[in-house]
Image: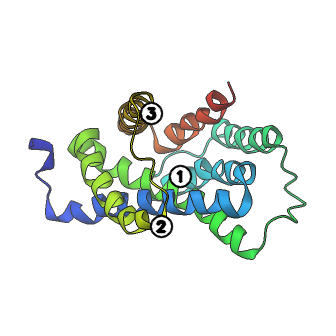
């Protein structure tokens, strides 16, 4: 409860965090539908570049050769692993590309808002507000989506794991990393999710 006593001046950052998170999830899924999972993964891998450049301008974080090299490796490696020819995307149209290119910017927006707030409110306080706002954004879309109910014991356990480990655990650790690392470094490290997904 202590971490939910929000200063009014911080509310735009926390609401922005939820807005970016909700928008990211909506457009990420839309990009998968329009472009396919491979192209969407490659476009998402541009996120560290957006965060690193924004952090350079916002907080004067150094733009080092190591960061630039890491971003090139992430982007190139993701494109190679996804077997996407970046110079020949006939399967995507303008709408698909616009939605796809929004994905790394929305992911970066939530990361930057979180970096700005996590030291003050902690991961739990930030995520409570951000997930609440994102849930309200996703709620109107639920009637148009097939719901996986009723849950059997196996799928209920998997669903609880998705919430506790992958969602709350993953996002909390990312924000805690943001608290102790530069935003550019944390955003580069979080792209290791692509590597672990392949494994």
Q: Secondary structure at mark 1?
A: helix
The answer to whether residue 112 is left or right of residue 7 is: right
The answer to whether residue 187 is left or right of residue 115 is: right
Question: In the figure, residue 132 lies in which quadrant?
Answer: bottom left
Q: Which residue is denoted by mark 2 in the rendering?
A: 144
Report the residue at 25% width, 40% height from top: 124
Q: Which residue is denoted by mark 1 in the rendering?
A: 51
Report the residue at 45% width, 47% height from top: 148
In front: label 1 or label 3: 3
Depth check: 158 or 120 in front? 158
Q: Secondary structure at mark 2?
A: helix
Q: Residues within 10 Å of mark 3 (few under 14, many from 20)?
A: few
Q: Is residue 180 visible?
A: no
Question: In the figure, residue 74 lies in which quadrant?
Answer: top right
Among the two numbered marks 2 and 1 on one chain, the one whose residue lies closer to the N terminus: 1
- Which residue ends up furthest to the bottom in the rendered image? 94
> Disc 2 to disc 1, how far (Cα)?
33 Å
> Disc 1 to disc 3, how far (Cα)?
35 Å
Among the two numbered marks 1 and 3 on one chain, the one whose residue lies closer to the N terminus: 1
Among the two numbered marks 2 and 3 on one chain, the one whose residue lies closer to the N terminus: 2
Q: Is residue 64 above or below residue 30?
A: above
Q: Which residue is denoted by mark 3 in the rendering?
A: 155
Q: Secondary structure at mark 3?
A: helix
Report the residue at 68% width, 43% height from top: 71
């Amino acid at each position: 409860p202590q971490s939910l006593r929000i200063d009014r001046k911080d509310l735009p950052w926390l609401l922005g965090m939820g807005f970016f998170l909700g928008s990211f999830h909506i457009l990420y899924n839309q990009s998968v539908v329009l472009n396919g999972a491979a192209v969407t993964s490659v476009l998402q891998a541009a996120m560290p570049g957006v965060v690193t450049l924004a952090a350079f301008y916002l907080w004067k974080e150094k733009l080092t050769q190591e960061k630039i090299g890491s971003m090139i490796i992430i982007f190139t490696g993701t494109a190679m692993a996804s077997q996407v020819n970046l110079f020949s995307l006939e399967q995507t149209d303008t709408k698909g590309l616009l939605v796809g290119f929004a994905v790394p910017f929305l992911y970066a927006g939530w990361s930057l808002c979180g970096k700005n707030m996590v030291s003050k409110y902690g991961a739990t306080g930030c995520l409570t507000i951000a997930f609440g706002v994102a849930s309200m954004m996703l709620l109107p879309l639920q009637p148009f989506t097939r719901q996986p109910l009723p849950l059997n014991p196996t799928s209920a356990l998997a669903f609880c794991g998705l919430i506790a480990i992958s969602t709350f655990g993953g996002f909390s650790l990312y924000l805690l990393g943001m608290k102790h690392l530069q935003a550019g470094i944390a955003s580069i490290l979080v792209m290791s999710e692509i590597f672990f997904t392949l494994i």
